Image (tube, helix red, strand yellow):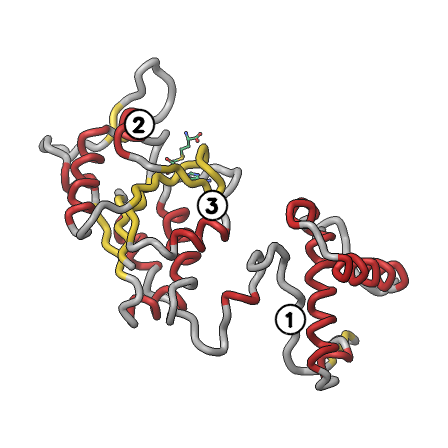
Amino acid sequence: MRIAVVSLFPQMIRDALSYGVVGRAIERNKLEVACVDPRDYATDVHRTVDDRPYGGGPGMVLKVEPLVAALRAAEAAFPARVRRILLGADGRRFEQAIAREAALWPGLILVAGRYEGVDERFVEGEIDAVWSIGDYILSGGELPALVVIDAIARLLPGTLGAAESAEQESFSDGLLDWPHYTRPAAIAGRAVPEVLSSGDHAAIARWRRREALGRTWLRRPDMLERRGMSAEERALLEEFKAERAHDAGRVESSFVR
Ligand code: SAM
């Protein structure tokens, strides 16, 4: 898959792409990321890419012409038209389902805004969708672009090793992940749940399912409501609630909820 990022800070994108799963995806040629800087397409001596907002007010707005020129340069490297996505807090929430869909596309172009944002005529004329990574304001679209790239890269076939799996992660089936533990078996008076050392695979799978349901119920009841539950899952969740009610040592503060 090929992703092009239109950004005023291409080095910020490049630097972050060399690590971990994404770095590996690039190394294995599963993913190619190219950056295009609109400043390289500004036509005046000052390489101006922004201007004051019509109607007054603080901040600057990214101009249409350098953005369009950068977009055309980014497009030129694709054999066919790909989707053009603007990162914006006013966009559709980027979620795992969108990442899964995008991982099937041959490529895409991500446009990172800066300052107050981009001239709306660029959005109307050139952009297929606006994606937000959450209800907060960042200084630029570079971090959101990196978030999108990372989420997509780990879904590309052959990116994750055999020991890792995107299928068992949070959101894969509408639930959060279950808790994980590693050695030592006990630390600071806290022991690993006994069932996990039992060797009973069915019991472990059942416990994990129950914890995933319980954790989702505690922290993301909205997800559970949307997803619904089978009769068996309802029973597992009731078991989780009952155990929790009797477990005075368990710390589930409003912070973790
Ligand atoms: N005036 C804009 C608003 O109120 O929505 C905020 C602009 S923000 C300072 C600059 C750029 O950062 C945006 O154009 C966008 O590309 C990016 N950005 C900021 N927050 C974002 C978010 N939550 N999701 C995606 N992109 C975001």
Residue 246 sits in which quadrant?
A: bottom right
- Above or below 32: residue 74: above
x, y percent for residue 31 = 30, 62
Which comes before the other along the chain, label 1 or label 2? 2
Q: Which residue is at the far right?
A: 246
| Disc 3 C-beta below 8 A from ligand 1 | yes
Q: Nearer the viewer, residue 61 or 111?
A: 111
Which comes before the other along the chain, label 2 or label 3? 3
Which residue is found at the position 28% from the left and 57% from the top? 14
Which is more foreground, mark 3 or mark 1? 3
x, y percent for residue 156 = 38, 64
Task: Identify the mark at residue 180; answer none if there is no mark.
Answer: 1
Classify mark 3: residues with Cα within 10 Å, few (<14), some (14-19) or many (20+).
Answer: some
Please name the residue that numbered disc 3 is placed on: 94
Task: Identify the mark at residue 196; answer none if there is no mark.
Answer: none
Classify mark 1: residues with Cα within 10 Å, few (<14), some (14-19) or many (20+).
Answer: few
Q: Is residue 204 left or right of residue 92?
A: right
Task: Identify the mark at residue 124; answer none if there is no mark.
Answer: 2
Which comes before the other along the chain, label 3 or label 1? 3
Circle 1 SS class? loop
Q: Which residue is at the far front?
A: 231
Q: Amino acid at mark 1?
A: His
Which residue is found at the position 32% from the left and 65% from the top? 18
Task: Name the image quarter holding the N terminus.
Answer: bottom left
Q: Amino acid at mark 2?
A: Glu
Q: Amino acid at mark 3?
A: Phe
x, y percent for residue 135 = 53, 38
